[in-house]
Image: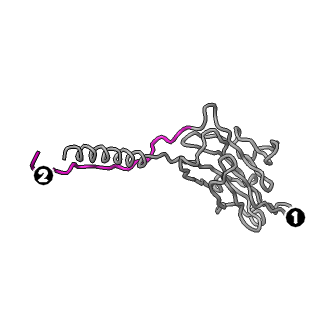
Amino acid sequence: MYGVNIKACVFCAAALQAMVTSAVYAESRISFLAAGEAYDGAPAFEIRIGDKVIGRGELTKAIDTVYEGRLFFSPAPDQYIERFEFRVDDKVFRPDAPISIVLVNDKFKEEGWGRDRNLFVRSIEVNGLTVRAADLRLTDGVKVQNVNYQAGLLPVYHQNHMAVAEPPEGGWPVPANPRSSRLTVAPAASGAGG
């Protein structure tokens, strides 16, 4: 009888350890601040870790270039800044991979100045570490593009161009507080005997 109970205890301890181990996991948070210029629709984006798309979205506060003018001529460009946040499971998160914000729906009308759809990135944040516009790269996916910053923002003017934050030496930080589940186990009282 004791042999069975010892085996049962060993099995229960192993099962409990597996449950506790699987209950604790990290969830990274990647966010960015951006503004946009709208023309026949707002700018849309993809956010990527390396080459993997982890999210998509569209700006809702983009300045209308037909009726309101251009972002960099606005007396209050900060009113168009939006924050987007994405939660990334630790199975997908790669601390050594760049984070990219890609403009996926560029539109421009050549006749008539100002009819343009653009994305302007202020910063990218990974688990609390912020990379500001001046430290981002603009690339077309092959080579770095040189552009002038507008009101402290990195402009992304063309289809599939992207603002890229490179990981710091040693990689992106891990989440400060991994999520966990609390599991309480109360031993069952055994019957009398022995």
Q: Is residue 176 left or right of residue 116?
A: left
Frontmost residue, 27 versus 29: 27
Q: Which residues are magenta?
A: 173-194
Pick out the residue farthest to the bottom. Answer: 40
Depth check: 138 or 179 in front? 179
- Residue where numbered disc 1 is placed: 112
Please tell me which residue is depicted at 74% across the width and 55% down the height of the picture: 103
Mark 1 element type: loop
Q: Is residue 138 above or below residue 114?
A: above
Query: In which image quadrant can residue 152 be found?
Result: top right
Which is closer to the viewer, label 2 or label 1?
2
Number of numbered discs: 2
For residue 28, which numbered disc appears in the image?
none
For badge 2, the amino acid type reads Gly
Mark yes or no: residue 151 visible: no
Q: Main secondary structure of the magenta part?
A: loop
Instruction: Name the residue carrying label 2.
Output: 191
Residue occupying image coordinates x 74% and y 62%:
38
Q: Which mark is first along the chain, 1 or 2? A: 1
Q: Residue at x 16, y 50 (%)?
A: 189
Q: Is residue 36 magenta?
A: no
Place of residue 40 in the rendered image (x, y in percent of width and height, measured from the top left): 76, 68
Residue 89 pos. (x, y %): 53, 50
Q: In the orientation shown, which residue stands out farthest toward the right?
A: 111
Give amino acid for label 1. Answer: Gly
